[in-house]
Image: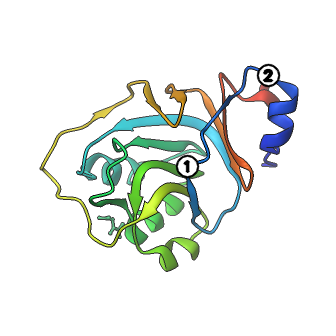
Amino acid sequence: MSIPATTDLCDADAEAQVCEPVFRAFGGRPAFAGPITTLKVFEDNTLVREAVGRPGAGRVLVVDGGGSRRCSLFGGNLAVAAATNGWAGVVVHGCVRDVAELAAHPIGVRALASFPRSSEPGLHSGQAGLPVRFAGVLFREGAWLCADEDGIVVLPGDPSAG
Ligand SMILES: O=C([O-])CC(=O)C(=O)O
């Protein structure tokens, strides 16, 4: 699948939602795009682990981790699972770890920062499929996200679907 440039998407659609430039790029895939699946979690990556263990079918997992910089929600093992199961990418409003491993897998990853300590499974519950809002953007299940070296853009649907 060819990935459109986020710059072109913005030029073509003044209503495209554009994330505030707060994310760092991790992962071995510099650009990725796909329909969104949402998770809302806090300092517990149980639902993230479950999601990337299921078929991704080219989707992008958007994880609202509340912006916590106190633990990591995604790392090398989950990147292997996500890539193996066909997820296009993961956007984490929170931290990731295993930076060198993330770069070795064919998956796109955006996160606020790296942090070496993992989360504590079972500490807090989370929810799947809810609209989540961070970095100035509302992410709805089924909306379409495109990320590249210039940034992250969200559209109501896949622009190539006509
Ligand atoms: O618990 C985490 O942060 C995830 C992790 O280490 C991994 O996926 O290898």
**What kind of element bears circle 2?**
loop
Q: Viewer-proximal residue, 96 or 52?
A: 96
User: Residue 14 bears which disc, if any?
Assistant: 2
* Image mark for residue 103: none
State which quadrant residue 70 falls in. Answer: bottom left
Amino acid carrying label 1: it is Val
Rendered image quadrant of residue 130: top left
Q: Earlier in the sequence, mark 1 or mark 2?
A: 2
Image coordinates of residue 104 in percent, x first then y, are 57, 77
Residue drawn where x is 72% and y is 29% of the image: 158
- Left or right: 77, with 25 as reference point: left
Indicate whether 28 appears above or below 3: below
Residue 109 percent across, percent down from the top left: 55, 58
Does 25 sit above or below residue 117? Answer: above
Q: Which mark is residue 22?
A: 1
Q: Nearer the viewer, residue 65 or 136?
A: 136
In this rendering, would 130 be left or right of 139?
left
Colour convention of the picture: rainbow
Compare residues 19 and 49 and report the one nearer the observer.
19
